[in-house]
Image (tube, grey):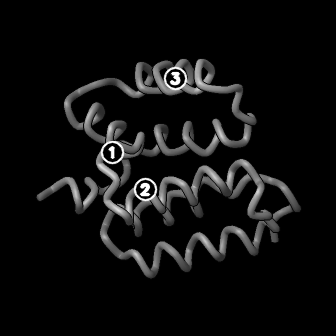
Amino acid sequence: MGKEGSAPTKRMVKNFFTLLFSGKISKAEESLRRIRRRYKLGEDDPYYKALYGIYYAYTTDDRDSFVYKLWDRYLNGEKKGSLKKHFKDVLQEAYNPPERFLKAWLDLIDLLDSLPKPHRIKK
């Protein structure tokens, strides 16, 4: 079991993103619930909020969301280091986000090259 308020393991997070971007939405939702339970993350936990936001934007097909913009830039050849810098800059300008919120997004960027191409983008 994870410690309360600790960040989930990369393996758990990668599993969640893999299910989500493969189009296995109900399994991704269950994976997100499992992460939340195992790590005792409340709805207000910044890491959980970021994961849920990514899940919600993707499942509602919000093409203007950052998750779609991120994938678009990555699939068009932008390097992960550049994506991280851009993401941090955008968030720092918008508001000063909690470190754990940033960490969830940076974890996603770190995992991009090992995740399946999002099924909604393939169309």
In the displayed orientation, state which residue is furthest to the right: 4
Q: Residue at x 71, y 26 (%)?
A: 96
Q: Quadrant of the N terminus?
A: bottom right
In the image, residue 5 above or below residue 97:
below
Marks 2 and 3: CB-CB under 8 Å?
A: no
Q: Earlier in the sequence, mark 2 or mark 3?
A: 2
Q: Is residue 4 left or right of residue 96?
A: right
Q: CA distance from mark 2 to mark 3?
A: 18 Å
As rendered, which of 75 and 91 lies closer to the eye? Answer: 91
Q: Residue at x 43, y 56 (%)?
A: 57
Q: Which mark is residue 90?
A: 3
**Type of the residue with mark 2:** Ala
Q: Earlier in the sequence, mark 1 or mark 2?
A: 2
Secondary structure under badge 2?
helix
Image coordinates for residue 71, horizontal then vertical, percent:
31, 41
Secondary structure under badge 3?
helix
Q: Residue at x 74, y 63 (%)?
A: 43
Residue denoted by label 1 = 68
In the image, residue 63 above or below residue 19:
above
**Type of the residue with mark 1:** Tyr
In the image, residue 69 above or below residue 115:
above
Q: Residue at x 20, y 53 (%)?
A: 121
In the image, residue 109 above or below residue 43:
above
Q: CA distance from mark 1 to mark 3?
A: 15 Å
In the displayed orientation, state which residue is furthest to the left: 123
Q: Residues within 10 Å of mark 1 (few under 14, many from 20)?
A: some
Q: Which mark is residue 57?
A: 2
**Type of the residue with mark 3:** Val
Q: Quadrant of the C terminus?
A: bottom left
